[in-house]
Image (tube, rainbow, N blue to C red):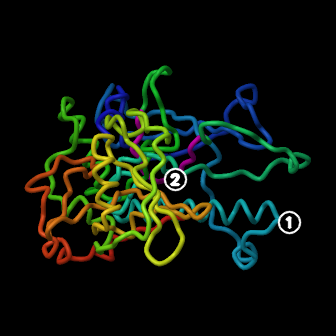
Amino acid sequence: MANFVGLYPEIYLARAVSAARAPEDEQPYPDLEPLFDYKFDVVEVLRGPDLSRIVQRGATPFSDPPTVSCLEQGQSLYTRACNVEVTNMTRHNWAHQLADAGHRDWSSFHSMSPYAQAGMGAAEAVPAEGAEDLILISCGGKTPSFEIGETFLIMRGNPDAWDRRFGLNYRLITREDDLWLEGVRYLVENPNAGFLQETPVSSILAAFGTPEVVTFATCEHDPDEVLYDEVYMAGFSGMRPVARFSYLEDDTIVKFHQRDELASEALTHCQSGGAFVLFREALGFERDSEIYALMPPFPVRDGVVDFSHLPSQWSIAGPSQIPLQDVLSWPARDTEEAAGAP
């Protein structure tokens, strides 16, 4: 996160006040993904020129809720318009869930995996007549969309800066105590900080629900799997998929990432039948019988849980070796702050 925030010379908290379709000669795919120029009133300047208004290009604005007929019908292969309405509603509601919870359950933030949709995501537009059968192939994600009247944290950089449009940028902000907003403010005020301020392990992991103790049926490892690049892992070079673990009673495979120097140790612990503390809500979506854990399981040795390899945006305050009994007594997350995913 510190690396990401450092890329942008301009950071604004700003409210979207209007959107107008961009000039036709600047529309690469006018029938499929029309572009709009949004005007924002600046609420707060975190970094950059003291501006009162900024303009940001984006995709189709989020519009009114879907019609009753589309909600009753849901997704359908035969009605493109209803598909768009339901998809946009899902993205809109998800963004508001995260923002209304102050981003306290935003796993992409907590786990240093900035791969979530940008802000509210991208609102889809119904193609113009005659374009329904066109297929648009793109790389790097769609341009973000915004909801008029809502406030967003917008980071702007030079054209050569790495800009992950489907990542940490353009987050919807609805609370003064938003955790993401507070984090960005801290890093702006402390430009030499590599991480956020010190926080206990229990607070860092609160977003992932209740801990549980597990062992794995089998432990396998592919030494040829590619390491994650340090750019993607916020400065942690050499992140390796440690093992393909058969999870509990079924045949689903769990992969998790460890820094390279700890990968062998974690694998050995697994193969010896060692127990781990796992946060079930840190498991991603299953795909082809494989799940990638957003937060790795933590080894338990002699009744003590080792959190020294915790991949966190925060510096760890206090011990990283914590008795298992204490870990299992951590209070459950405040359900009022819980936020789901689409």
Judge whether residue 271 is colored magenta.
Answer: no
First in sequence: mark 2 vs mark 1? 1
Q: Residues within 10 Å of mark 2 (few under 14, many from 20)?
A: many
Image quarter where the N terminus lies is: top left
Image quarter where the C terminus lies is: bottom right
Which of the pair 7/321 is nearer the observer? Answer: 321
Which of the pair 13/137 is nearer the observer? Answer: 137
Judge whether residue 144 is colored magenta.
Answer: yes
253 left or right, relative to 296: right
247 left or right, relative to 131: left
On the image, numbered disc 2 is attached to which residue? Answer: 120
211 left or right, relative to 192: right
Marking on residue 116: none
Region of the chain picked out in magenta, as a range: 143-155
As shown in the figure, which amino acid type bears the numbered disc 2?
Met
Q: Nearer the viewer, mark 2 or mark 1?
A: 1
Which of the pair 39/10 is nearer the observer? Answer: 10
Q: Name which residue lies at 59% across and 43% down.
A: 19
Q: In x, y percent, where is residue 77?
A: 82, 65
Q: Name which residue lies at 48% across and 32% down.
A: 163
Q: In x, y percent, where is residue 309?
A: 24, 50
Which of the pair 231/10 is nearer the observer? Answer: 231
Which residue is most to the front?
272
Q: In x, y percent, where is residue 47?
A: 29, 31
Q: Give the secondary structure at mark 1.
A: loop
